[in-house]
Each structure stands twice: as C-alpha cells, then as structure tokens.
Image (spheres, rainbow, N blue to C red):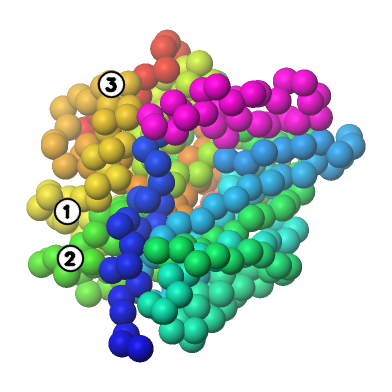
Amino acid sequence: MPEIRLTSLAHGGGCGCKLAPGVLRDLLKDMPLGGTFPDLLVGLETGDDAAVYRINDTQAIVATTDFFTPIVDDPTDFGRIAAANALSDVYAMGGKPLLALAILGIPLGKIEPSVVRAILAGGASICAEAGIPVAGGHSIDVPEPIYGLAVIGLVNPARVMRNGAARAGDALILTKPLGIGILSAALKQDAPGLPPEAYAALVRTATRLNTVGADLAVLPSVHAMTDVTGFGLAGHALEMCRASHLGASIGIAALPLLPGIAALARNGIRTGAATRNWASYGEEVRLAGTEPWHQDLICDPQSSGGLLVAVAPEGAPAAMALLREAGFAESAIIGHITSGPPLLTITA
C-alpha cells in the first residue's frame, strides 16, 4: 500500500472541521434543555465545554466527547493532539479526568494498520501523561480518518468552572499562543516564509495538557473559564459573553502568537474554518483600528488550544504566577470583560 499523507484524506483538519458556530446553534435550538434534571449542573444551555452531573455534595461527573480529522500527517502526533484536545474539555470545567474511550474512524484499504496503531498509541500516550487509561472505545469504516476520545472526569460541584460566570471588570487571560490553524494550513501548503521550527511549535503547543485548569478553579478570583478550539478566540470569547450577558474587549497587541504567525496571516494564509467562523459571528464583533489579517487571527480554529480565563483584576497576578509555575510561559492578559450587551471589541 503506497504511503499517503493523512491530511490529504480529509476535507479539513483538526478543529477546523467542526460545524460553523452559527450552523451548530441553529441545529441545537430545538433540543430539550436539562431543566427537569436538577442534578444536571451544566448542559446545553450556554454551549459550555462539557456536561456536569452532580452525584453528591462533593462529587460531580464531567462528561465530554471530541474528535476530528487529521491536522498533521504524522499519525502519532495526530493521536496525541486529538487526545489532548478532548481532555481539555474536562480541565476547562475545573475537573480532572478519570478514564477515556477511543473514537476511531478509518477508511479501510487506504491506511496501513501500522498507521492506525500509531494514531491509537499517540492518544494513549497523552492519556498516560494525564494519568488515566484508555478503557475501551468504538471504531467504524468511514471515508475520512477521524480520531478522538470520550472522557469522563470528576469535579467538586462547588468548583465547577462555567463559561457564563464572568463579571464586568474581569481580566481575560489566554494560556496558549494562537495560530495553530494558520500554521497547519501553511504546513499543508508548504508556504514560503514558514519558520523551520514551525511544526515542532505546533505539536508542542497542541499536545500540552491543560491540567492547570483544575488548579485555576481553586482560586476564588477565577470566575469563568473555557477552552479555545474550533470557533477561534473570538467565537469562544463570544460564548463567554453571551452566557455571562456581558461584553469583552481584547487587544491584538496583547495576544501571544506562535512563531511566524503574523507574517503568514499577513500573506493570506488562513483556514476555511476562519472564514466560516466570521460569517457565523462577525456581526457581534467590533473591530477598532485593526488590520485585515487580524480578523483571520481571531477566527483561527485552534486544535487543542489554550484556556480563556476570566479572573478578578486583583486576582490576575496570582493566576498568572500559577500559570508560569505550571509551564505556560506564553500565557498573557489579553483584555477584559465589559458591561453592556454581549459584543466583542477587538482593538489594535
């Protein structure tokens, strides 16, 4: 069987293959909410990262599932990135994972069994890093390769992190640099000006576990949290705004970026998902003094991106110190929550 690039088998890569946020909202608008289940602490209502179901006064289950098509060609790295991305939902809720189940779709006859084993091994290695087993899973024959996890975790009901508890005046912290989608598109296109360390930077960032979310949830000054994935920074910030019934302001100059991202974006490197994202929520974003490429940057889908954290201003130094100690050296305060309607303002 000839060697085939994994990314060539998929129409989109990583979180860039997610349904556009506007399409998803329309599909889910008639879904029944969980109001009749008093122990369902977090459901569909605010588009949060995972479901949370209370067991007792000190324990609640966190449940999530996440999978996508290849963002890179190396099968082990694909498995690692997809697994880290799925686990992130539990950390974003302030929880800790207990176990995972693998979700695997493979186009039979197009991929060598050794490649499939490498994908599974990559995912298992990240789960081992998180201290949990891959306890089972499900596989199907599909036209495009997909991989991900269903994850079960635990959280104290009193420490559940939601995306809808931000307060006016809160500082906004982003824990990882942006640009994963732009960088993956540039790698796929073999774009000129691509930094030599680009691939290593992408994998290093996308496979870094967001375990720090559980530690941030303990800080009383941290009010809300979500992870930044397929809808881009703007999309997930807007989810926080809508759920909190507040606005937000973010400064482009404050954003941490992966190496070479600004130059690539200026040269028009973008994903199709960035365009779909803007079409879904652009009317809720106000651009002030920005350049055209900034739009692609804030809409760029992040596969296993960082956490977006709303923290009281007086608690921001402690949160930043915790992040630095945990190894998130590129984390930064990128803006703040504002009073008023749920609109996002982006300034230069």
Q: Is residue 16 above or below residue 173?
A: below
In this figure, which residue is indicated by the disc labeled 3?
A: 283
The residue at 72%/38% (across/down) is 52
Provide the secondary structure element on which disc 3 rests: helix
**In this figure, which residue is indicated by the disc labeled 1?**
269
Q: Quick check: 119 above or below 10?
A: below
SS at circle 1: loop
Reply yes or no: does residue 265 show up in magenta. Answer: no
Say whether disc 3 or disc 1 marks the residue closer to the N-terminus.
1
* 55 horizontally vs 188: left or right: right
Q: Residues within 10 Å of mark 2 (few under 14, many from 20)?
A: few
User: For the view shown, which residue lies furthest in the top direction?
Assistant: 340
Rendered location of residue 56, percent (x, y): 89, 37
What residue do we see at 71% from left, 45% from top? Answer: 62
The kind of residue on which mark 2 rests is Gln
Tell me which residue sits at (29%, 61%) in the image: 184
Q: Earlier in the sequence, mark 1 or mark 2?
A: 2
Q: Which mark is residue 237?
A: none
**Residue ID for mark 2:** 189
Q: Residue 30: horizontal and vertical position, in percent?
A: 55, 22
Disc 3 to disc 2, how far (Cα)? 30 Å
Residue 346's place in the image compared with 120, above or below, is: above
User: Is residue 104 at all visible to an observer of this figure?
Assistant: yes
